[in-house]
Structure formats: C-alpha cells, structure tokens
Image: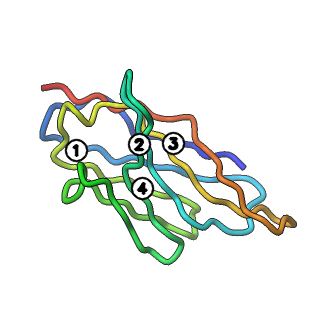
Amino acid sequence: VQLQASGGGLVQAGGSLRLSCTASGSIFSINAMNWYRQAPGKQRELVAGITSGGSTNYADSVKGRFTISRDNAKNTAYLQMNSLKPEDTAKYYCNANVRRRGVPNSDFYWGQGTLVTVSS
C-alpha cells in the first residue's frame, strides 16, 4: 500500500491550499484517513481526521479554517486549508488505516509528506 500526498506549496498568509492523499495498492478497505503536520523543531501533530463514514475531527488550531473530506471511490482524502497563517508552515503527512486484500487486520500507512509554506 502506498499513500501519495500532493498539493503543498508556497502561499501568502490568508491564502488557501488543497492537499490530496491517494492510497493505492492491494486495498480491501480504508478506515480512518488523517492529516498530520510537522514543523521544524516540533513534534508531529494531528491536524484532522475522517472516518470511513465521514465523521471528522480537528485540532483546535485549525478548526473553522481547515476542512477534511474524502472520496471513498478514489481512495483519496483531501484537506482544504483556508485563511492560512505563517504558523501553519510545516510538512504535511497523510496517514491511513488500511486493510489489505487477503489480510484480516488493518495497519497504518504513511505518505511521504508535502511541504506547506505560508509567508507573512
């Protein structure tokens, strides 16, 4: 299973970006899909998560500005980021709990990360 994240870039404060994360491989089902971020010198933190049924959760720091969604048919999760702030600058990683075909249990997989830089 591979997770491919894309959509990062350089944006001015107040701007928007949309990240995508697509899972591929021998996938039977995907449970939760999450976005994490890690800024230089800081620990990785959960930004937002979404279950297969569409329930969502957000870090307090992004509530009202970020929206996570998913397209189950495309095995893809999105993170719409609005009103970006310099403190949102980080490498953003997607994470998914995936059950592979022929395997009874699910595992967590990580994408390679995509860099988001917000200038003031």
Image coords of residue 50 (percent x, y): 45, 65
Q: Residue at x 77, y 61 (%)?
A: 100
Q: Position of residue 2 (x, y in %)?
A: 67, 46
Percent position of residue 71, x then y: 49, 67
Q: Earlier in the sequence, mark 1 or mark 2?
A: 1
Choose the circle earlier in sequence order: 1 or 4: 1
Instruction: Tell me which label, 1 or 3, sits earlier in the chain.
Output: 3
Dot 3 falls on a residue whose secondary structure is: strand
**Residue corresponding to mark 3:** 5
Q: CA distance from mark 1 to mark 3?
A: 17 Å
80 over 11 or under it: above or below: below
Q: In the rendered image, which quarter is residue 42 located in?
A: top left
Q: Amino acid at mark 1?
A: Ser
Q: Residue flagged by tag 4: what amino acid is it?
A: Tyr
Real-space CA distance between mark 2 and mark 3, rounded to the nearest whole angstrom: 17 Å
- Which residue corresponds to the image point at 37% horizontal and 64% vertical from the top-left? 57
Q: Earlier in the sequence, mark 2 or mark 3?
A: 3
Q: Nearer the viewer, mark 2 or mark 4?
A: 2
Label 3 crowd bin: few (<14), some (14–19), many (20+), radius 10 Å: many
